Structure formats: C-alpha cells, structure tokens
Image (spheres, grey):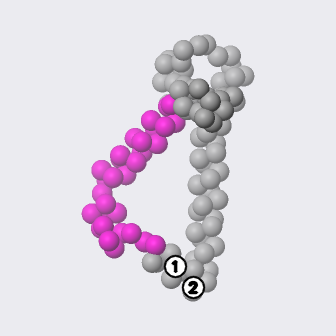
Amino acid sequence: MRFVAERAARRKVSASEAESGPGVLFSSGLIAGASVAGMTVALMQLSGPTRALLGAANLSRLIPAVAQSDLAALLLFLALAVVLFLVASERLLRAGAVLGAR
C-alpha cells in the first residue's frame, strides 16, 4: 500500500517523513485499536451476563449468508485499503486541517 501511495503522491517525501507519515500512523492506530477491541471482547467472555450480551449482539444468526461470505470479507478489506490509501496519500485527513474549515 505504501508503494502505491508514494507513487500517487503529489509531492516527494523524505525517508524520515515516510516513516512517520499519515499512512503509517493510521495503520498503526488500526492495529492498536484492533488489539484493544480484541482484548475487550476476550475479557467480556469471562462473565455470564456479558457473554449473553455478546451473544445477543451477534448478527450472524440474522444474516448468516453475510457471516459466512468471502465476498463480504473481501469488500470490507477493499474498503479498508481504499481508506488507508486516501490517508497515506493525504487526500483524506490532511495534516493540519481544521474540521469545518474550507
């Protein structure tokens, strides 16, 4: 992804900027967030009431075709790749941008 983002970049970046660029920071945040979410769900499995809550929130019973679909997983992966590309190429979430400012 980094190779594609660097090729599509509108400006050249130095090696130090590339190592701490928005794409690297965003993907690091995704990894950290996924690990925190995984630990939270694992800890919720320890007690009966929270295990029942997780069972009620499980949508695979309502739409089993989506839960077992490789196509759904591929589409989610592609959507994540597009967002990562947009962040890495600084087309989304520009550094220093103020929300609501034009």
Disc 1 to disc 2: CB gap under 8 Å: yes
Q: Is residue 24 shown to the viewer in this render?
A: no
Q: Is residue 20 left or right of residue 100?
A: right
Residue at the spot 61% in from the left edge and 13% down from the top edge: 12
Residue at the spot 61% in from the left edge and 80% down from the top edge: 46
Specify the quadrant of the image occupied by residue 101. top right
Percent of width and height locating residue 72: 33, 52
Helix, strand or loop for disc 1: helix
Residue 100 to residue 16: above or below: below
Q: Dot 2, crowdedness within 10 Å: few (<14), some or many (≥20)?
A: few
Label 1 belongs to which residue?
A: 53
Q: Is residue 77 in the magenta section?
A: yes
Residue at the spot 59% in from the left edge and 40% down from the top edge: 27
Mark 1 to mark 2 CA distance (whole Å): 6 Å
Label 2 belongs to which residue?
A: 49
> Bounds of the magenta span?
57-86
Work out whether residue 32 or residue 58 is closer to the camera in this orientation and state it.
58
Identify which amino acid the numbered label 2 is placed on.
Answer: Pro
Residue at the spot 58% in from the left edge and 69% down from the top edge: 41
Residue 72 to residue 60: above or below: above
